[in-house]
Amino acid sequence: MDLPKIVSKSPVKINVKKDTRYAWCSCGLSSKDPYCDGSHKGTGFKPMIVKEEADKTIFLCSCKNTSNSPYCDGTHNNL
């Protein structure tokens, strides 16, 4: 499997709604990052479904190298 494409070296802040599903792009090829647009097809990557238990603000990884997918863990600081 190829490494994911680094979209950005900073997280994406989003406000999520309780029980709403979001598809996080894990490959870095989506034109709608951090959301999946299907560009992963044929790559071995799959989107990760995010569904939060409450309305809140989260930070999604855009470097695609986090160890806490899909959330930013600061890994981008070492790339």
Image: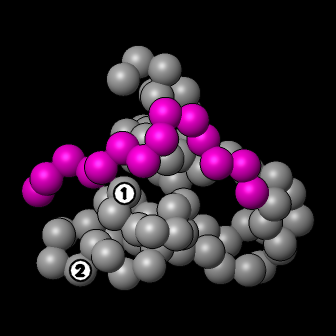
Mark 2 highlights which residue? 41
Which quadrant of the view contains residue 50? bottom right
Using a 10 Å C-alpha cutoff, classify the residue at mark 2 as few (fewer than 14 neighbours), some (14 to 19) or many (20 or more). few
Mark 1 highlights which residue? 28
Q: Which residue type carries mark 2? A: Lys
Confirm whether the magenta stretch covers residue 11. Answer: yes
Secondary structure beneath label 1:
loop
The chosen color scheme is one colour
Secondary structure beneath label 2:
loop
Who comes first in sequence, dot 2 or dot 1?
1
Q: Which residue type carries mark 1? A: Gly
Picture residue at 61% right of the left edge, 74% below the top: 22
Using a 10 Å C-alpha cutoff, classify the residue at mark 1 as few (fewer than 14 neighbours), some (14 to 19) or many (20 or more). many
Residue placed most toward the observer, 33 or 46: 33
Residue located farthest toward the right when viewing the structure as drawn: 55
Seen in the picture, residue 9 relative to 42 is either above or below; the reply is: above
Residue placed most toward the observer, 58 or 77: 77
Picture residue at 77% right of the left edge, 79% below the top: 19
Seen in the picture, residue 60 relative to 35 is either above or below; the reply is: above
Give me the C-alpha separation between circle 2 and circle 1: 12 Å
Confirm whether the magenta stretch covers residue 31. Answer: no
What x and y, as percent, mark residue 56? 86, 57
Tell me where the magenta segment starts and ends, as one range.
1-14
Residue located farthest toward the top when viewing the structure as drawn: 78
